[in-house]
Image: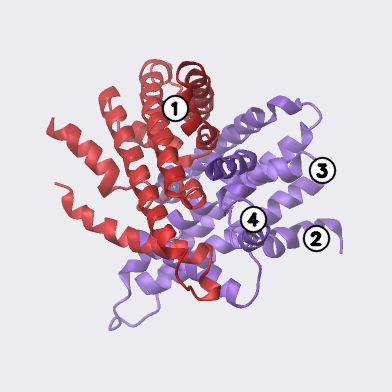
Amino acid sequence: MNKYVERLYNGIIKENPTLILLLGMCPTLAVSTRAMNGIGMGLSTTAVLILSNVVISLLRKLIPDSVRLPAYIVIVASLVTVTELVIEAFLPGLYKSLGIYIPLIVVNCIILGRAEAYANKHSVGLSLFDGLGMGLGFTAALTLAGLVREFLGNGSVFGFRVLPEAIEPMGIFVQPPGAFLVIALFIAVMNAIGIKTRQRQLVESDGCDMGCAGCAMAKDCAKAKGGEEK
Amino acid sequence: MKEMILLIVGGALINNVVLNQFLGICSFLGVSRDIKASASLGGAVIFVITIASAVASLLYTYVLAPFGLDYMKTIVFILIIAALVQIVEMFLKKKSPAIYESLGIFLPLITTNCAVLGVALTNVQNDYDFLQSVLSGFGTALGFTLAIVLLASIRSRLNEKDIPAPLRGAPIVLIAAALMSIAFMGFSGLSF
């Protein structure tokens, strides 16, 4: 397989950041109330991810190793600010419905995680496709969660009512508890049909727990675990 | 006085940062295996969020807003938080090694905790003044601590239960969080 296509496949299916790596849970839970919100959030994150991967890959020989994390954070924060201003100018409706979660793309584990795990070691072209694949994988997962929650909780798909009026939708699914439930069921179904999430591999290897393990702070996380045993 | 109490209660219970706004999910799920560890993390989070919202509020009111630089707030806030965590860590290490021992390992984790940045940005969005920012920061952090200690207690019970295989690990923790979230929805009746 062409290595660029392989990057896309890796990001969307094999190492899907949300469903397999369990990264970026905050935005996944928060904005998946509507399928459209999922697409909007996913594509905004994809834009930041592609740009940050490209910039970091271009600068990978210039940034000293000891200050690389602060440098990455500044790069990502600048790109997020640019994206935020563009969305505010051209898509005010989306800007309003995503609200504070747009600036919070800065602290999305997926972006720093890809910078640290991929972009600072690989060429610009490959990093671009890695960002695109990971971004699309994130978008797909968010949209899927949004579709399920919107259908169950609101009786509609992409804003169009599909359930007959006589059936009362289960409002709890567009409320905060629904987010936890839907994602829990997604992971449970994947466990049941034998797709291994990274969290399961980690349980077997007694590594860090889910969530923060893939991000730049994994080492501190492991230290925190070590501290517990004392 | 009533407003102040409302800000704290609102931050801690009504708009719980984890269960209602989904901020800080990473550490909420990651560190909640053990009650003691989650209480320590909670302590560190209260410490950092309260200080960070104070500093962010001062910087925004006296530096960013007067110079028309408010679009820079995301970059400035994330740098302040990262620097602040470093300073707090160094200060504690020197001045009170006992607290450092119990919180130290959790401090670096807080930089990437989106609750800290989230609170700073929400305060600016709501036009809170200095005192209001500090109080809402404190309330939010209190809510985080409450949620994570509760989840850790539930998880220590879950460890002894026979859970169906596909639900083991992340799914059962998320379901527990969903039930807690339903319980916390009851607090929305508290808003006056």
Chain of the residue under the numbered disc 2 shown in the image: A
Please report the residue visible at 43 percent of the width from the left and 64 percent of the height from the top: B158
In the image, is residue B14 above or below residue B64? below
Q: In which quarter of the image is the N terminus of chain B?
A: top left
* 10 Å crowding of disc 1: few (<14), some (14-19), many (20+): some
The chain whose colour is purple is: A
Helix, strand or loop at label 4? It is loop
Q: Drawn colour of chain B?
A: red
User: How far across and how far down the image is residue B33, in percent?
Assistant: 48, 53
Farthest residue in the front direction? Answer: A230
Q: Report whether mark 3 lies on the same chain as mark 1.
A: no
Residue highlighted by disc 3: A122
Please report the residue visible at 38 percent of the width from the left and 16 percent of the height from the top: B66
* Residue nearer the viewer, A14 or B12: B12
Q: Are marks 3 and 2 in contact (CB under 8 Å)?
A: no
Please report the residue visible at 46 percent of the width from the left and 16 percent of the height from the top: B95
Helix, strand or loop at label 3? It is loop
Q: Residue A6 carries which label?
A: 2
Residue highlighted by disc 1: B99
Chain of the residue under the numbered disc 4 shown in the image: A
Is residue A158 visible in this depiction of the protein?
A: no
Q: Nearer the viewer, mark 4 or mark 3?
A: 4
In the image, is residue A62 above or below residue B141? above
Residue highlighted by disc 4: A206
Q: Which of marks 2 and 1 is in front?
A: 1
In the image, is residue B55 above or below residue B39? above
* 10 Å crowding of disc 3: few (<14), some (14-19), many (20+): some
